[in-house]
Amino acid sequence: MLAVFLLASGALAQQVKLRVFIGGQQRPDVMRKILDAYERQNPGVKVEIEVGGATSDQQQQYLTTVLTSRDPSLDIILIDIIRPAQYKAAGWSEPLDRYLPLGARDALLRQYLPAYARANIVDGALIALPAFADAQFLFYRKDLLDKYGFKPPTTWDEAIRQAQTILQGERNPNLNGIGFMGNISEGTVCSFLLPIWAAGGDVTDERGRLVLTEELARRSLQFWLGLMDNHRVSPPNMAEKAQDTIRREMQQGRWIFGTLFAYAWAHFQNDPDSQVKGRIGVAVMPRFEGGRSASCLGGWQWTISNFSRNKAQAYRLLRYLSSPEVSKVLALEASNLPAFPELYRDPEILKVNPWFADALPVVLNARARPVHPRYPEVADVIRRGLNAVLARTKAPEQAAREIVQGLRAIYGQ
């Protein structure tokens, strides 16, 4: 009897508990299945999930409080692709290089899409590994475009004309034309950048120096405002719209077009309350006449908290979570774009997500938001400027001037 007790006590003493943080939109149900599989393969490890925040901003607000206090309760954290530089500068992430033998890091990173390998190296240090890729696409009501004889638009002018025609023909007060992110959230940074990229511009150059002009900023702000005021294909309250608001409303059949990230597909097809199952198509983001298509690079990364008390075990779990096997599960069950190029040809994945066949070039060519240790301040200047224009509290000219001035203060130029 005593021997049995001692054996049980030893087993309990050896058990490691790990805590993983993910956001509310990042399919905790699917993640639980993945972690259950890991526990079965590693009987001495128990993994808990902490879920917080519906958006990248809300998650980071909470995580900033936890990490600033050096709280050891979290071991692994799922972070937005925009965060590695911030985490490195703040000392919040455990560098992963110390767990990789010499030369093994490059071999590991070559497995991933190049943008994600680059995003996770900051000042030569490997801060995180990819969980899944992402980019913006134009989701559209396939049934409505078919009804009016339209093909998916390739330019913004086409999208506007199609939306106007369909709205006029349907005469449905609950149907809207073009949905985009306009509230004070991370997605609104992408909205601001899309017209700038499509016009051949950017916020910074290849050396990270600020190059955004007031004229480019004004044109972007004016374009989104014009969808409401001039073209009347977006409702007057776009300043209130977050990404998941657009997704939920499109799921209710209330949008013709939506500029959304890949996660929306699984909701449209699988959610019990979806009214658009089988009626949604996916296309590349439109371009401007004479310009090029531009998409905002998204994606999420796994990092180890620098304050974890179980870093070695956390690293083993992180490698599992950033593996092709887990990436395939996320693609099948959550429509998360893989960070591994070969999975875009996987027959099982394509059966569930047929549009993935055309998604790889979009992800490969998607543009990254500015990389800066003070990125939260960069984002805040941009999204508050666009939101103020959409709310009609500032004219595009004033907001453009304030955006550029605010960025110059951050960049020291």
Image (cartoon, rainbow, N blue to C red):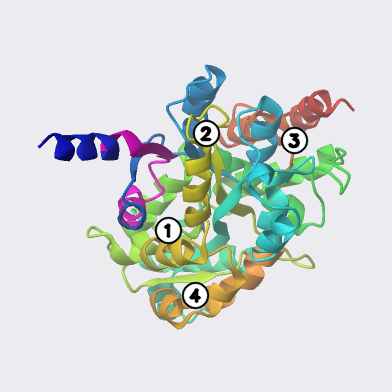
Residue 399: horizontal and vertical position, in percent?
A: 71, 30
Judged left or right of residue 323, residue 84 is right
Residue 303 occupies which quadrant of the picture?
top right
Judged left or right of residue 176, residue 364 is right
Q: As rendered, which of 47 and 233 lies closer to the eye?
A: 47
Q: As rendered, which of 91 and 301 lies closer to the eye?
A: 91
Please identify the quadrant where the N terminus is shown.
top left
Q: Nearer the viewer, mark 1 or mark 3?
A: 3
Tell me which numbered mark, 1 or 3, is placed earlier along the sequence.
Answer: 1
User: Mark on residue 355?
Assistant: 4
Marks 1/4: CA distance?
Answer: 13 Å
Could you classify mark 2 by the number of other residues whose Cα lies within 10 Å: few (under 14), some (14-19), or many (20 or more)?
some
- Residue carrying label 2: 57
Could you classify mark 4 by the number of other residues whose Cα lies within 10 Å: few (under 14), some (14-19), or many (20 or more)?
some
Q: Amino acid at mark 2?
A: Asp
Secondary element under disc 2, as helix, strand or loop, is helix
Judged left or right of residue 247, residue 157 is right
